[in-house]
Amino acid sequence: MTAPIALVTGASAGMGRDIAWALAAAGYDLGLLGRRSEGLEETAEGVAAAGRRSISLIADVCDATALSAALDDFLAWSGDRVDVLINAAGWTGPLSPPIHEISVEDFDATVATNLRAPFLTLKRLLPVMYAQGAGRIVNMGGNHGMRGRAGRAAFSASKWGLRGLSRTAALEAGPHGVTVNLIAPGPVAVPRMKANWRAQAQAEGVAEEVILARYMQAMGAALGQPSEPQDVVAMVMFLVGEGGGAITGQELIIDGGVIV
Ligand SMILES: NC(=O)c1ccc[n+]([C@@H]2O[C@H](COP(=O)([O-])OP(=O)(O)OC[C@H]3O[C@@H](n4cnc5c(N)ncnc54)[C@H](OP(=O)(O)O)[C@@H]3O)[C@@H](O)[C@H]2O)c1
């Protein structure tokens, strides 16, 4: 029996990598898409260790031509099949400037990464799933796409837009047996975030716990601590597994109780 096939964007780091490894452990062969070959190599090693095959696809998702070429390569490799698509590539964009100080270039790049790229992967891969009569798609949003946040205009707007894309895709894809859902994480302790917290603690000469406690308090998180990547991975695996068959068009917030 041939293995099911998944494509994960943003597979060279963070949650995309962890999701790819979880899918490999569940028996999927994988398309791994990102910009950094060394990051993708490390993910591919984990996939191979689970006994599964992968293809590394190097592309900047903001570059529509490069993304299209990577999707061509993926489909040639997979034999025009894709059972699961995870749009995990994302960029926080400018971190604190108010709207009047955000450059047009930064705004456009944030939207291109977080919204246009998922549109492009859906545009290309939905027909493949329609031909199969089945497929599961998970788009990674963010809890700042569920509410406004001062200093995160580009990120919030792009992730908010992704909700509209995901809900509309769910309505269009449902009759073809394809589900589309969005996960909206809050702060997740991925290596990038941990490095930020460590750097801030060093800059202020305080313990990392102090920075974290302050950050989570400012966020108003009920649980008072960041989520772990595995919290998000578990939800992805639920949505693409047996339990997720009748769930579509939904937004699953995993943020320790910020949006309540
Ligand atoms: N971590 C959090 O606290 C958090 C909170 C809310 C939402 N999210 C969302 O969850 C998803 C995963 O976040 P993360 O923190 O786990 O990721 P991360 O560690 O920041 O890694 C980002 C991933 O996206 C890829 N990527 C970014 N821009 C890209 C581009 N232009 N072209 C191709 N690949 C690109 C990176 O590839 P390269 O490294 O190869 O460039 C990397 O694989 C993102 O959509 C993010 O917005 C995360």
Image (cartoon, helix red, strand yellow):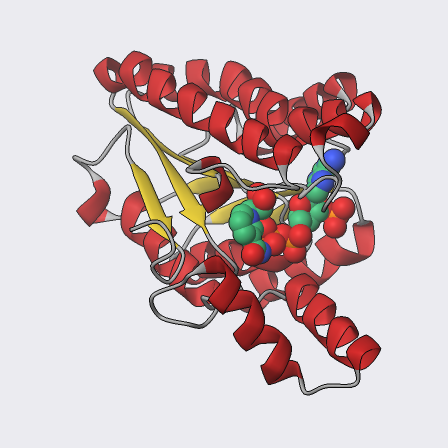
Does residue 17 appear in this view?
Answer: no
**Viewer-nearest residue: 193 or 136:** 193
- Nearer-the-camera pick, 198 or 241: 198
Q: Residue at x 45, y 45 (%)?
A: 143
Where is residue 200 shown, x and y percent of the image? 75, 72
**Number of residue marks:** 0
In this rendering, position of residue 34 left or right of residue 203: left
Residue 195: quarter of image: bottom right
The residue closer to the viewer here, 54 or 69, is: 69
Picture coordinates of residue 48 (x, y %)? Answer: 59, 62
Q: Is residue 19 in view from this perspective?
A: yes
Residue at coordinates 64% horizontally, 25% vertically from top-left? 71
Q: Is residue 35 above or below residue 104?
A: below
Q: Residue at x 52, y 59 (%)?
A: 187
Look at the picture and state if 20 lies above or below 229: above
Residue 92 placement, left or right of 253? right
| Residue shown at the point (45%, 31%) measured from the top left | 82
Q: Position of residue 155 (x, y in %)?
A: 61, 36
Quarter of the image with the N terminus in it: top left
Compared to residue 19, the image places residue 214 above or below, namely below
Relative to 7, does residue 76 appear above or below in the rendering? above
